[in-house]
Image (cartoon, rainbow, N blue to C red):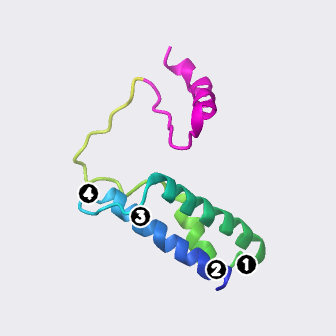
Amino acid sequence: MAKTDDLKTLLTQLQDADKAYYDAASEVKMSDDEYDVLRESAESLLIDLRKENSGHPTVSEAEVYFAKVGAEASTGIWRKRNHQIPMGSLSKVKGLEGLKEWWDKTAFTVR
């Protein structure tokens, strides 16, 4: 299977997982760690393909996919609110050392 086919398969799996995650009626069928591995694999493959085949439609599709953040905006059900302190992400923290590094970067905003 060509690398572009592999990337297309990974993108489809990621898009399906995103849809399930953001759609309250759907069941999420993978863990956060499985999703992270899938996403990191697709990103790595995209880096390789940028060098080899940057004009391929699947590469362009992947560029668009990785440029977006989150889901479609809600239809005005919720009012926009500002947090009193920045809401830093713990999603990529692995182990105690990672937690210490995260805390060192964000602790000043909590004090």
Q: Amino acid at mark 1?
A: Asn
Question: Which amino acid lies under the numbered mark 2 shown in the image of this protein?
Answer: Thr
Which stretch is magenta? Answer: 85-111
- Name the residue rendered at 37%, 31% in the picture: 82
The label on residue 53 is: 1
**Residue 99 position within the rendered picture, expressed as x and y whole percent measured from the top left:** 57, 31
Judge whether residue 96 is colored magenta. yes
Q: CA distance from mark 4 to mark 2?
A: 31 Å
- Which residue is farthest right? 51
Amino acid identity at mark 3 = Ala
Front disc: 1 or 2 = 2
Q: Which mark is residue 17?
A: 3
SS at circle 3 = helix
Q: CA distance from mark 3 to mark 1?
A: 26 Å
Going from the N terminus, do you reach mark 3 or mark 4 first? 3
Q: Secondary structure at mark 4?
A: loop
Q: Is residue 10 above or below residue 96?
A: below
